Image (cartoon, rainbow, N blue to C red):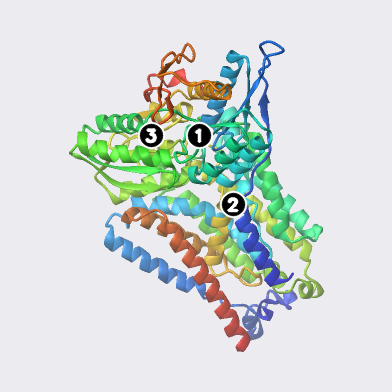
Amino acid sequence: MTTESLNKNDKTEKNEKSPKRVRVLPAPVTGQEVVLVGVIALLWAGLALSTPAFLTAGSIQPLLVATAPIALIGVGMTIVIITGGIDVSVGGAIMVCSVLTAKTLVGSGVNLGVAVLLSVLTGGVLGLVNGVLIAYGRVHAIIITFGTANLFMFLGLQIFGSGTVNGIPGTLAFFGRGPDGRTLGVPHAFLITVLVTAAAWWYLRHTAGGRHFFAIGGDAQAARLAGVRVQRRVLLAYTTTGLLVGLASCFVIAQGTSTLDQTVGSGKELAVIAAVVIGGTSIMGGRGSVLGTLLGALLVQSVASGVTQLGWRSQLSDLFVGIFIIVAVGADLLRARARRSR
Amino acid sequence: MRPRFTAAVALTATAALALTGCTKKNDTDTAAGGDAGAKTYKVAFVPKLQGVPYFEAMNAGGKEAAAALGNVEWLYQGPTQADAAAQADIVRSYIQQKVDALIVAPNDPDSMAPLLQQAKDAGIHVATADTDAPSSVREVFVNQATADGIGQGLTDALLTAMGGKGKYAIVSCGQTAENLNAWIEVQKAYTKEKYPEAQIVDIVYAGEDQAKATQMATDLMNAHPDLTGLVGECTSSAPGVAQAVKDAGKIGKVFTVGLGTPQAMKPYLQDKSSTAAILWDVENLGYLTAWAGAQIAQGKSFEATNNVSGDLSAVTYDSASKMLLLGPALAITDQNVDQFNY
């Protein structure tokens, strides 16, 4: 299905200039990104015309902050889905990371660096658990992560211990919506997300290791025969997702209130998967783009903010997101058909 | 990996995600008291959600009542997510256990009605507390406050801060939550009647998601630059709207009130981003619920005015609507917030 992504010339990685290499490399964007940029531009233009306050810093900055956690986890989720897997445990993992971090912030008043490190490491461990079970357990990712999702929720609720976490200090305001969360008007949370996305885009497109993820999703057996260390790659994909969940949990705490309750993370796995699918990544694996995921997350949040700012009924944003997902999957199937008939 | 299978499983499992997350935990506190021969009545309460401070405070009040009454065994178990199906399972298990009185705070009043009928058919006395199921066979509804009390309390507290005039918006939670909608109706009518110079410009629904409530409040402030008030209609959006005002640096320009639990609202009441939290004494509500359960379990009827305990010496009962009323709403401000430990 995706022979174009099967990179058989790992050893000649440095030889970028040869015409043969160029053909092996896929286009820098998969097609969906251009469409998404167009849709977002149209949407923003429409919103700017109908509500003058939309295209102001006070409106766009919070929008970017709200996009950040979904888009950041989306980077990991895109890689996971490219390998043909899925991770439905990220909501539970957000709960564990954020409640642990929030409790530590309240209990021992650690500084920003320690809090982030704690959250990221916790997320990494949870991702590693998923990765080990999926890479070496030979059970499909959805079953494993469905199981771990419930385990993580149990763990999270145990840490909550029948009560909310109150009085969380403003240590994480660096990632928040307030003035402490911006430098020169750019929200830190969004900037970090863009940098991570850019690094992942470069890695996935220009390194042998990155191309291997696509090879696994295209045909894991063929990839193995071509010398790809499939298990190690799969382990890396889920661990990366876990680490990003840890960082995103800090964003979630910073965006919330000084209280954390057990609804934190609830349903976020679906929001992340929606962003990935709208971004043009094939749910079947083998094809995908982290840039698309960032744009997908931005589109979903723009719609949500737009619906509120226009004074429309809140449930319309669910309708629009539903339509986007179906249209995106349809477009993906059409592209796949066009490729086959070529 | 078989792509078709993957997609099919993915869809099924994501749909199933909404139905999971219920960990079984039987919070059974036997108040073994009274004579050895006297019957102990099992009074079970099923909250909307377990592990949130609101219902945990009700649980504490219920336990206290059971200990004081002596002949009551207080059972408390709720779903870990505010989900009607998970709640229905718990109700069914109590029906099978043949408790003497079953009291529910339904997530979905309509789907709870047939279950309450089933319980009645099994010889169990049924009641509702916190949220009513009006079209059901419940014998009594333990009401924390009338819709008028809450709606007017919220409106008066907000409009006093706003100087009796101006535009405000409401960030509500569940779109179908009967009590929230009843309060909103009162707020609309009461604002129109008592504060003709004030106007509700929008009502949005954020679910139980704090970060979403905060983002929606931010969007509302952007869409209406002349907005001077925000109402957080439930315990997750009350701190959410205050956080949004704080992040936007509009403390003193935009005033907020909300249905918030005291400890969660404390930091916002102290920095003035929230003017007041309107609530009731939740522990007393739990106490009254357990007491009412014991009454109906013993087949006793209610007087027009009931002496329940030292704190609740004159609880009124309306026989037309079969409703016990806890009392007037309580305004929590920075002055009295420390009196409440939940």
Q: Nearer the viewer, mark 1 or mark 2?
A: 1
The percent position of residue B319, horizontal first and vertical second, equals 40, 26
Residue A22 versus residue A237: which sits nearer the camera? A237
The location of residue B184, given as percent across then percent down, is: 34, 40
| Residue B205 place in picture, x, y as percent | 41, 47
Residue shown at 59%/43% (left/top)? B88
The disc labelled 3 sits on which kind of residue?
Answer: Gly
Give the letter of the chain under mark 1.
Answer: B
Looking at the rendered structure, which numbered label has been put on residue B40?
A: none
Q: CA distance from mark 1 to mark 3?
A: 29 Å
Instruction: Work out whether residue B173 or residue A18 is closer to the camera in this orientation and state it.
Output: B173
Q: Earlier in the sequence, mark 1 or mark 2?
A: 2
What is the three-letter code of the residue carrying label 1?
Answer: Arg
Q: Which residue is mark 3?
A: B258
Position above or below: B223 against A225: above
Tell me, yes or no, whether the two marked residues, 1 and 2, touch with CB atoms within 8 Å.
Answer: no
Q: Which residue is mark 2?
A: B18
Q: Which residue is mark 1?
A: B138
SS of the residue at dot 1? loop
A8 vs A252: above or below: below
Quadrant of residue A238 within the rendered picture: bottom right
Q: Label 2 lies in what chain?
A: B
Pick whichever, A266 or A126, lies toward us.
A266
Residue at (61, 58) in percent of width and height: B14
Along the polypeptide, which appears first: circle 2 or circle 3? 2
Q: Is residue A150 above or below residue A194?
A: above
Instruction: Quote the CA–CA distance across marks 1 and 2.
Output: 28 Å
